[in-house]
Amino acid sequence: MIGADTSEGILQQARSAYGSQANLTFAIGDAYHLPFDDNTFDIVHAHALLIHLQDATSVIKEFARVTKPGGLVSLGEGIAANIISLKPDLPALRDFMAFNMDFLPTIGFDVYAGEHLVGWASEAGIMDGEAGWKVESGRYNIPIPSLKSRVMGHAAEMTIETSNATPEMIEEWRKGWETWEEDENAEFIWEAGTLLAWKPLA
């Protein structure tokens, strides 16, 4: 298995967490131009990647290129705007989420990425029954951990610098997440989309 990312810092974190697994290595790789030959992998999987990208269709084409005939392209993306459950349902957290749903698209994030997987795959030439492709898609609910880190330290500074968020707003959101973390029944779930596409043998 090979894990790829454009950031050496992220790869270092991955090596620290999972580097002891003998069958796992890591490599610098740009999803738009993967450094692998055609038909290399049995499975190509990406989770919560396309939400960050400007041209998801090109990336899916690249995933299909490096997948072996008979292999699987597996995609999972959140639909961050579709909150299924928020307990305790705190006003500060609702305000935090509403702010991000407005702000993130302005810096290129697609907060509805999970809804677009089928359309993106179709644009990439991956359609069920088309040229032998077999495609399945669906929805699921995904638990989300505390997002307090988004309103602390460097992340908070970047939010203030790149948006109209104020230090007072950041502090209110931080307190909200701390209150949420202290609740033993805390729950935060949003919807996600999944797509599985089997590459034709010929």
Image (cartoon, rainbow, N blue to C red):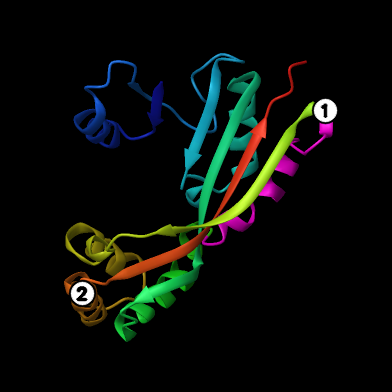
Of residues 53 and 199, the one nearer the viewer is 199
Q: Is residue 123 placed above or below 180 in the rendered structure?
A: above
What is the C-alpha distance between the residues marked 1 and 2?
Answer: 52 Å
Mark 2 residue element = loop
Q: Is residue 17 left or right of residue 91?
A: left
- The residue shown at (82%, 28%) is 131
Which of the labelled discs sits on residue 183, or is there none?
2
- The residue shown at (50%, 34%) is 45
Mark 1 residue element = helix
- The residue shown at (27%, 21%) is 21
Q: Is residue 163 left or right of residue 130?
A: left
Q: Is residue 37 placed above or below 153 in the rendered structure?
A: above
Which callout, 1 or 2, points at the residue further toward the start of the chain?
1
Q: Position of residue 71 (x, y in %)?
A: 62, 22
Q: Position of residue 47 (x, y in %)?
A: 47, 43
The picture quadrant where one finds residue 172 is: bottom left
Q: Position of residue 160 (x, y in %)?
A: 28, 69
Q: Residues within 10 Å of mark 2 (few under 14, many from 20)?
A: few
Which of the labelled discs sits on residue 131, or is there none?
1
The picture quadrant where one finds residue 69 is: top right
Q: Amino acid at mark 1?
A: Ala
Q: Which residues are magenta?
A: 111-131
Which of the labelled discs sits on residue 83, or is there none?
none
Q: Position of residue 102 (x, y in %)?
A: 48, 73
